[in-house]
Image (cartoon, rainbow, N blue to C red):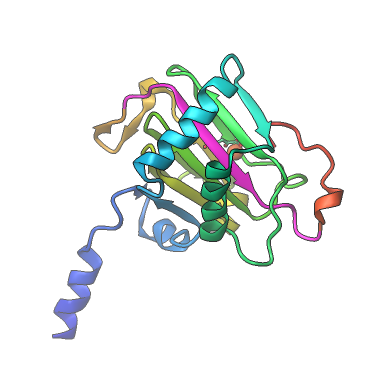
Amino acid sequence: MAGTGLLALRTLPGPSWVRGSGPSVLNRLRDAAVVQPGFLSTAEEETLSRELEPAIHGFRETEKSRWSEASRAILQRVQAAAFGPGQTLLSSVHVLDLEARGYIKPHVDSIKFCGATIAGLSLLSPSVMRLVHTQEPGEWLELLLEPGSLYILRGSARYDFSHEILRDEESFFGERRIPRGRRISVICRSLPEGMGPGESGQPPAAC
Ligand SMILES: O=C(O)CCC(=O)C(=O)O
Ligand SMILES: [Fe+2]
């Protein structure tokens, strides 16, 4: 029966990595805020952690343009998964090291330096990323970022919503407590549309 089918569809739970203020925002951002849990294999997580832990020790963030061959292969997988063929990536990759007590305040990435797509790998600790509509603060999404996951923010999720990484005290995914430890993220961004690789200038580290 069609009616029963529709009802069943409406009550189907969404993916386990997203929560939102309501069905409309979940629906609108379905393709704009995406998490792929387990994007990295355990071996790939180890490859990146081994390369990055000592490299950024003592730094909070860095721009990295030279990578081992194994890590380059991982970054190419990110590019294929998150970016379109017409998108050029910023030449260096942003690496951020957040200590267990660290967090990232709500912000929208600079539209001057970053294009329509932001893709991030999370290593070491799980965390919760919250997106809040800049004009309608009652509209929000929360993404559960497990280690080894890839998140992609594009279009409306990137331009119309701020994003933040919750501090340990606020780190809940619904009822579920997500204790924060040290977290390393690896963030790839597209260049602003119409900007060739040679015209990118020097974006600030936080973009
Ligand atoms: O650590 C992350 O995954 C997000 C970082 C971020 O929002 C930024 O650097 O602009
Ligand atoms: Fe950001």
**Quadrant position of the C terminus in the picture:** top right
Q: Does 185 sit above or below residue 133?
A: above
Residue occupying the point 52% across, 54% down: 77
- Going by the picture, which residue comes out furthest to the top? 58
Q: Which residues are magenta?
A: 179-194
- Residue 162 visible in this rendered orientation of the protein: no
Q: Is residue 96 left or right of residue 13?
A: right
- Residue 183 visible in this rendered orientation of the protein: yes
Residue occupying the point 59% across, 32% down: 95
**Quadrant position of the N terminus in the picture:** bottom left
Q: How many marks?
A: 0
Q: Is residue 178 magenta?
A: no
- Going by the picture, which residue comes out furthest to the bottom? 1
Near-viewer residue (112 or 37): 37
Q: Position of residue 84 (x, y in %)?
A: 61, 64
Q: Does 55 sit above or below residue 92?
A: above
Q: Position of residue 177 (x, y in %)?
A: 27, 29
Q: Does 23 sit above or below residue 148?
A: below
Residue occupying the point 38% across, 22% down: 181
Residue occupying the point 38% across, 29% down: 125
